[in-house]
Image (spheres, rainbow, N blue to C red):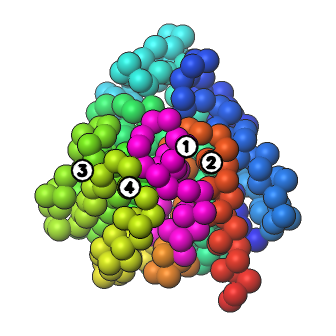
Amino acid sequence: MLPVIYSHEFLDHKTGRYHPEKPERLSVIVNALQQSAFAEKITWRSPTPVLSQPLLMPMLLKAHDPAYVNKVKQIAASGGGYLDSDTPVSPRSYDVALLAVSAWLDGVDAVLQLANPAFVLARPPGHHAENNAGMGFCLFSHAAIAALYALEQPGVNRVAILDWDVHHGNGTQSIVETHPQIAYCSLHQHPCYPGTGQASEQGFYHNVLNLPILPASDITTYQPLIENKAIPFLADFGADLLIVSAGYDANASDPLASINLQPQDYALFTDACLGITRKVLFGLEGGYDFTSLSQSVLGTIERCLQQFSAK
């Protein structure tokens, strides 16, 4: 059984009719999983309510400036607004974003308890959110917060993050690059939003590996980079937990980038992660074409379940 952490409340972050990061992203994934051939092998878990998660705010404030957190809260409380032109905040967005953080913390707990993968199906995404600024559809930096939380758990001394979203996770990198116990690796289109992620950016402890990829690339470019660069970097770090910022916007059909992956390619990525460790937390980031998004998530989860069967 594979835990999928999800709440209908994640649909309450409203971004507007024409915004690409919309509630239907989750609805199509949930429907696809419920109708899949392996539906009975999924354990649906609700995230811990925010008020019952005592470490949520302390961990949030390890990653984000209190003034920024309060800003998001106040915008939501005043009826909504924007952090930047791409990043709306609706009346329930602050509460939903906190619940998303809680879901990622629950995901860490599930992986460490089971020593097997789990998937966090939450929104808004998080990897562009910096210490004092939300941007790129993101309010809070889930993967970074989850990594910091994991380091406080017994037996966890090192955490690695793999970001396969088509956009560089500038927020994640900016928060974790100063932590010698956290490694970050990103494969992303360049040039592309947000313009960060040069190969020369290596972190304060050589704990960052950026692998920029040219537009129009496909799996023939990705596969050797994963096998010869990303996986050795992550494996050599010796992490006790691997967190994956699982964005699926590098698909050829996705409207927000120009990479030509196919949904089945993410099964290869998943295999590579599971080859390092069974302790993998996958968390949704981008992906804006509904069909390829749902197919890609299914491919990730199905490959995890197939790996279960092989054990």
Q: Does the stretch in magenta take in 268?
A: yes
> Where 21 sits versus 62, above or below?
above
In which quadrant of the rendered view does residue 226 lie? bottom left
Q: CA distance from mark 4 to mark 2?
A: 17 Å
Q: CA distance from mark 1 to mark 2?
A: 7 Å
- The kind of secondary structure element at disc 4 is loop
Magenta residues, as a range? Answer: 242-271
Q: Amino acid at mark 4?
A: Ser
Q: Amino acid at mark 1?
A: Ser
x and y percentages locating residue 224 in the rendered image: 36, 73
Left or right, residue 42 beside residue 114? right
Q: Amino acid at mark 2?
A: Ser
Q: Which-is-in-front pick, marks 1 and 3?
A: 1
> Where 178 sits versus 256, above or below?
below
Residue under label 4, please give it: 217
* Residue positioned 55% across, 63% down in the render: 266
In which quadrant of the rendered view does residue 90 lie? top right
CB within 8 Å, label 2 to label 3: no
Residue under label 1, please give it: 253
Specify the label residue 292 is tagged with.
2
Mark 4 crowdedness (10 Å alpha carbons): few <14, some 14-19, many ≥20? some
Q: Nearer the viewer, residue 229 or 92?
A: 229
Left or right, residue 59 beside residue 1? left
Q: Which-is-in-front pick, marks 1 and 2?
A: 1
* Residue positioned 54% across, 75% down in the render: 271
Reading the chain from its start, which is encountered first: label 2 or label 3? 3
